[in-house]
Image (cartoon, helix red, strand yellow):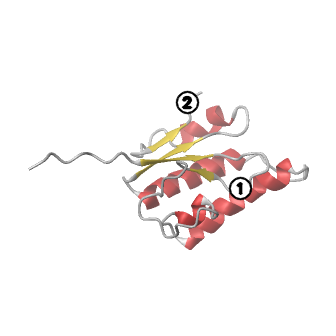
Amino acid sequence: MGATRAVEPYPIRMFAECGADFALWGVLDVDPPGAVSDDPDESLEHQLPITADLRDRLLSWADWHFRYDGGDRAINMDDFDNVGMMLSRELMRELGPQYTVTYHFTFAGSRERFLPLVEHEPLDGWAPNRV
């Protein structure tokens, strides 16, 4: 009998990108485990086995930045990275051990302001980006 090979978790990066109306970035040409859609034109948010509520909030978070990046400076971005960090942790909890989630802070100083809020609550598979 052959030895079983450990399957590496599927890595997801979450960050706001200029001009993007989605927040999740996966591995090119590799379907995520348990994918609910195999349409390559759909965002990763629509492919992952997550609740519709979380999917909507992730896309709303991405749209928040999309509108700000598009020039709407009336939008308050003070809590943007805190909301994103908390969403990324919720995403990790929903997805489970077949995945890893890395959150990339968007604004200068956010890492120092918000990371201490969760440092006392380790979450397997979740990490902030390395600076």
Mark 1 is surrounded, within 10 Å at the Cα level, by few (under 14), some (14 to 19) or many (20 or more) other residues, namely many
Residue for point 52% across, 66% down: 38
Q: Which amino acid does label 1 sit on?
A: Ala
Q: Mark 1 points at which residue?
A: 62
Residue for point 42% across, 46% down: 123
Relative image position of residue 41 (x, y in whole percent): 64, 63
Q: Is residue 88 left or right of residue 6?
A: right
Relative image position of residue 46 (x, y in whole percent): 58, 66
Q: Mark 2 points at which residue?
A: 130
Q: What residue type is labelled 2?
A: Arg
Q: Nearer the viewer, residue 79 or 107?
A: 107
Would you identify the image quadrant in which residue 33 lies?
bottom left
Q: Is residue 55 left or right of residue 72?
A: left
Q: Do the residues labelled 1 and 2 touch (CB within 8 Å)?
A: no
Task: Label 2: state its secondary structure.
Answer: loop
* Extreme residue toward the bottom, this view: 52
